[in-house]
């Protein structure tokens, strides 16, 4: 390894050790790892080809990958070898890996889930390919200016992305607009605009390199690179117009994660990558198979939400227009290939494209959608429509074009059946299945929490890395003082690491003995960061009012970005920062309460925050969080959850035991009922002197004396339009927080609860989730050539 690193430094970067930067060393290390990775990747790719295996194609607008160098080294089992080689060269592995920028090609849960799924598919040796977009700019960089979020373009591609392999030989024409002519019984699409989709491949290597899959991300190139005539005329903009138009398609990730934008460019992004992916998988199929009608036996196509739902009409277009198949047969064949995962019930997140826009960008596909609608209406006259009041409803299209539809937690799936797809569920009662989300323990325990990972492996061996159910063998240790000591010792190491980081980056000193209470996720009203900051203020007030009480010191940690156009979410961010400034400067509570909100929360920051957490905030309004996956990561790393009966919290509580979960709040049914009670918010506020006091303090500008009226709107909204029932759950939330305070005062009992959480997380591995998809939806299995882990 050492020689390889030096060779890459010299011949790859043209540098000698004495004059190399951290960037150079990282590139040299990455190249040395990449060489070793390729020796696992190529044989897998070849084996899948020669065996004509059925493949999974995971289509997603987002892959929230984070950093890759540690993942690669870890999955290849080369971390210690790399660390030793660098040490011999007077370099620090931990410093070098931190130099890699995050691949932030996603907004939040949906994107990260796709990344965890890719890791599990490779570790389970299931032949698969992820398809997405190679955004030039990923999710924006967040900074705070006077407590307010400001966004800056993300620039991960400004330096060499060492893990991708450009595939200029893999290119497809992607057409937009224009018109369709029908003659000699066939449709002929005459596009108005054409761009080229070109592939960039990133290998996804499973544990111990047993198998390797590919993440294929598409970039756009102009058909006509450069218009020399315009250039010679001095019209330089015109000269590169086609190029900039093409590049615009993949320029940036849309930063909205709950509200559909309805922007034409977003629709073009969705069609661009979906069309390239469908054309690519058909080309691959036809290299090994003669009859297109066998496609469903060789390709399981999964739609990660409705964003790639155009895949149905696109597949039908190719089967009918290019392969001459009859429409009805094409619809049936496409349905056998497609599965659709729903990730949200929020009405504003369900994509509905205006028919005029859809038809202008995709005239042939609109025709096909009408055919699909007619075919389904013929069979089910009272079925909900795809084409509804001038919109193309992508949820209905995805549902009708899929042979299986799944929700992402048991509660969510039941709500999908009862609400958003109730009518379609009645027509197709066996189509909806549940596949509760999961996370990869390779990244979210083994790599991000070496202290705890080592303790677990020393105790029960390392089988848990590919078989997370083995963690249950730790349950027996909940009565073992020495083990509990060691378990909390690992937590302590992580809390000190975080305290040093916060001190270095924010100049705030944290007490590692305090309870680290963490809420990290996208900022959204339904996730109720507002209720958390209200509780923080109430606690602060009580600490000031009763300084002699035996308070449990707390550190409130927030992390998360708001969609740039989401005004209320941005107000909540500002309030948290204003409150933090006042509380952190308060001498009366300086040893009891700190509020920390580091800017630019991302995957890498989560890997530092989660191992250091004592308390995990999963406090969404019941019925709103489809699943959550952060909740699983916290529990796996020995944090206790304070949460509502929402999403996967329900199943986590089932697995860890009711006594090891701080439950509070209205249930999903009760939420629906309470909303029917007029003035429910004012009634709740009226019944809570503590809440009244908190709201009064904010309203009077206690946290923004220079701008007292700053939060009049926000507080007014709570009184008159508290849609997410912050007011109704506040008191039980506050009381439950106090229960957590009491519990934290008994370290041995807390340790028993914490390790029981870790020991009970086997079910929440994305390996189990993928096995569920493979059995219920894809009918695929691990590649026979690869021995069990
Ligand atoms: C069209 C704009 C848009 C973009 C992304 C989305 C995603 C579906 C939002 C999302 O990330 N949903 C989250 O998905 C996770 C993975 O299943 C769940 O764990 C979260 O509960 C859910 O909010 C909706 C709408």
Image (tube, rainbow, N blue to C red):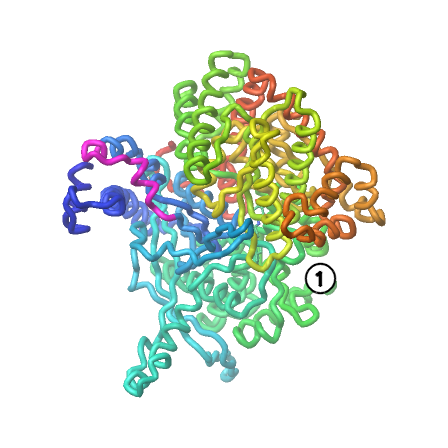
- Depicted 520 relative to depicted 56: above or below: above
Q: Is residue 149 magenta?
A: no
Q: Is residue 89 magenta?
A: yes
Residue at position x 18%, y 36% in the image: 2
Q: How many marks?
A: 1
523 sits to left or right of 62: right
Residue 218 picture location, percent across and down: 39, 61
Residue 454 picture location, percent across and down: 39, 24
Residue at position x 39%, y 34% in the image: 447
- Of residues 586 and 82, the one drawn nearer to the viewer in this rendering: 586
**Circle 1 sits in a helix, a strand or a loop, which is it?**
loop
The magenta stretch is: 85-101
The image quarter containing residue 451 is top left
Q: Which residue is mark 1?
A: 383
The image quarter containing residue 563 is bottom right
Q: Is residue 120 visible?
A: no
Residue 111 picture location, percent across and down: 49, 50
- Of residues 310 and 54, the one drawn nearer to the viewer in this rendering: 310
Classify the position of the C terminus by image quarter.
top left
Residue 467 picture location, percent across and down: 45, 30
The image quarter containing residue 662 is top right
- Depicted 220 relative to depicted 631: above or below: below
């Amino acid at each position: 390894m050492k020689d390889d690193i030096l060779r890459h430094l010299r011949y790859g970067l043209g540098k000698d050790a004495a004059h190399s930067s951290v960037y150079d060393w990282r590139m040299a290390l990455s190249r040395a790892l990449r060489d070793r990775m390729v020796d696992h990747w190529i044989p897998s790719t070849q084996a899948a080809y020669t065996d004509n295996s059925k493949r999974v194609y995971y289509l997603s607008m987002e892959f929230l990958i984070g950093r890759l160098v540690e993942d690669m080294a870890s999955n290849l089992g080369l971390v210690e070898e790399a660390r030793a080689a660098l040490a011999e060269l007077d370099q620090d592995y931990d410093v070098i890996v931190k130099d890699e920028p995050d691949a932030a090609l996603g907004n939040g849960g949906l994107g990260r889930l796709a990344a965890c799924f890719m890791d599990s598919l490779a570790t389970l040796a299931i032949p698969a390919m992820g398809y997405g977009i190679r955004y030039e700019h990923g999710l924006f960089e967040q900074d705070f200016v006077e407590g307010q979020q400001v966004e800056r373009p993300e620039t991960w591609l400004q330096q060499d992305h060492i893990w991708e392999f450009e595939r200029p030989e893999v290119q497809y024409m992607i057409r937009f607009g224009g018109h369709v002519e029908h003659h000699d019984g066939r449709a002929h699409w005459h596009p108005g605009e054409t761009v080229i989709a070109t592939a960039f491949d990133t290998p996804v290597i499973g544990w111990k390199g047993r198998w390797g899959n590919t993440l294929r991300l598409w970039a756009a190139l102009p058909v006509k690179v450069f218009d020399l005539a315009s250039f010679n005329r001095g019209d330089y903009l015109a000269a590169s117009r086609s190029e900039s138009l093409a590049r615009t398609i993949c320029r940036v990730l849309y930063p909205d994660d709950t509200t559909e934008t309805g922007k034409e460019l977003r629709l073009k992004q969705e069609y661009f990558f979906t069309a390239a992916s469908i054309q690519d998988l058909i080309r691959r199929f036809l290299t090994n198979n003669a009859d297109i009608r066998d496609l469903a036996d060789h390709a399981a196509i999964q739609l990660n939400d409705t964003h790639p739902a155009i895949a149905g009409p696109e597949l039908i277009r190719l089967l009918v227009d290019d392969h001459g198949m009859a429409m009805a047969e094409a619809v049936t064949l496409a349905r056998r290939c497609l599965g659709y995962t729903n990730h949200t019930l929020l009405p504003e997140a369900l994509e509905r494209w205006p028919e005029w826009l859809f038809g202008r960008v995709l005239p042939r596909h609109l025709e096909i959608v009408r055919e699909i609608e007619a075919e389904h209406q013929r069979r089910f006259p009272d079925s909900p429509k795809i084409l509804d009041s001038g919109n193309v409803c992508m949820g209905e299209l995805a549902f009708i074009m899929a042979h299986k539809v799944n929700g992402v937690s048991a509660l969510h799936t039941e709500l999908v059946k009862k609400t958003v797809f109730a009518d379609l569920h009645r027509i197709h009662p066996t189509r909806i299945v549940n596949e509760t989300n999961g996370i990869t323990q390779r990244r979210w325990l083994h790599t991000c929490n070496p202290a705890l990972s080592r303790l677990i492996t020393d105790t029960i061996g390392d089988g848990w890395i590919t078989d997370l159910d083995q963690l249950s063998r730790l349950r027996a240790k909940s009565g073992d003082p020495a083990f509990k000591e060691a378990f909390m010792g690992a937590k302590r190491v992580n809390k000190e690491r975080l305290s040093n980081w916060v001190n270095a980056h924010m100049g705030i000193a944290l007490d590692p003995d305090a309870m680290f209470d963490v809420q990290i996720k996208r900022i959204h009203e339904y996730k109720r960061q507002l209720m958390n900051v209200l509780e923080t203020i109430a606690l602060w007030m009580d600490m000031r009012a009763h300084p002699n009480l035996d308070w449990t010191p707390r550190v409130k940690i927030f992390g998360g970005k708001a969609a740039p156009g989401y005004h209320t979410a941005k107000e909540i961010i500002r309030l948290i920062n204003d409150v933090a400034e006042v509380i952190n400067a308060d001498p009366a509570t300086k040893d009891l309460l700190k509020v920390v909100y580091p800017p630019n929360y991302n995957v890498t920051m989560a890997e530092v925050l989660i191992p250091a957490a004592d308390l995990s905030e999963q406090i969404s309004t019941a019925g709103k969080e489809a699943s959550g996956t952060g909740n699983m990561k916290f529990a796996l790393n020995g944090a206790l959850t304070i949460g509502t009966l929402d999403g996967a919290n329900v199943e986590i509580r089932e697995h860890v035991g009711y006594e090891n979960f701080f439950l509070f709040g209205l249930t999903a049914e009760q939420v629906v009922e309470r909303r029917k009670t007029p003035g429910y918010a004012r009634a709740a506020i009226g019944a809570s002197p503590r809440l009244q006091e908190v709201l009064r303090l904010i309203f009077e500008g206690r946290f923004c004396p220079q701008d007292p009226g700053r939060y009049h709107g926000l507080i007014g909204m709570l009184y008159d339009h508290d849609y997410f029932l912050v007011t109704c759950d506040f008191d039980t939330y506050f009381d439950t927080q106090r229960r957590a305070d009491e519990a934290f005062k008994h370290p041995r009992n807390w340790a028993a609860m914490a390790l029981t959480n870790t020991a009970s997380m086997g079910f929440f591995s994305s390996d189990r989730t993928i096995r569920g998809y493979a059995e219920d939806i894809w009918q695929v299995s691990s590649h026979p050539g690869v021995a069990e882990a």
